[in-house]
Image (tube, grey):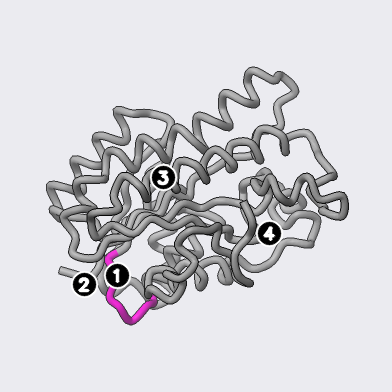
Amino acid sequence: MASRIALITGANSGIGFAIAKELAAAPEGFHVLLAGRTLSKVESAISEIETSGHGANGLTALELDVTNQTSIQTAASAVKQKFGRLDVLINNAGIENRDTDLVTKFHETFATNVLGPVLVSAAFRSLLLASPAPYSVYIGSVTSSLTSIVNPDSYLRTTTAGTNAYRASKTALNMIAMHEQLEVKDTPLKVRIMCPGFVVSNLRGTSEEARSGGGRAGDPASSARLLLSILRGERDGDAQGLITTSGVCPW
């Protein structure tokens, strides 16, 4: 069995896929579980990684919809049956809903970005605690920072259609992650929250314009390298904050 088993939600594209590629190529010997709502898309992502010559320690496709509790429980049972433990859980799946209907926008954003990670973490907690050195990592955002939004010079003072629900969901996620740290403080489980930065992703939509942020978005490989540094314990000194590539973002 691989030395470390890592599960990534929303792993078939964007940041999740970049993380999967990084872990599949890492010398630690990760067996990577790529989870997503559509199994065929996850399987295509695995084929792409294998074609690049990585994933020697194993790549597993896992159907997992973070907005569906039955799907989450089924996935957790499958991982328990096959592996008996989980060393790394990366709550990456997320959306930025720009629907003009407020109820739809907030309901769908919070269902994916907040309730989803809560349910996923709860379902996989016992498997993480079966690991000798587990990590639970939440993919957050510097746009969640209350300190920054009250700064007159901050770019967060500019808003767009989907930003209120998205930013609020990520602020809530910060509390979820920090609360989990308290819940597991007497166990080996390390809980971290990181911002991947403004990188190419399907978060904003699937068009090239949306994915690239109008050509301004960076390479998600940088996000993946940050994640790997966290799993190597290199950012343990930043455990009480929102970890970024350049340091820690104020809450």
Where disc 3 sits, the SS reads strand
Q: Where residue 152 sits: x, y (%)?
A: 87, 49
Q: Amino acid at mark 3?
A: Gly
* Magenta residues, start to end: 25-31
Q: Tell me, for residue 96, which label it has, or none.
A: none
27 in magenta: yes
Q: Quadrant of residue 20 in the image?
A: bottom left
Distance between mark 4 and mark 2 Cα atoms: 31 Å
What residue does disc 1 label?
30
Q: CA distance from mark 2 to mark 3?
A: 23 Å
**Residue at horizontal 53 percent and vertical 58 percent from the top:** 241
Q: Are marks 2 and 1 in contact (CB under 8 Å)?
A: yes
| Residue, disc 2 | 3
Q: Amino acid at mark 2?
A: Ser
The residue wearing badge 3 is 36
For disc 4, the marked residue is 198
Q: How many C-alpha atoms fall within 10 Å of the one at disc 1: few (<14), some, or many (≥20)?
A: many
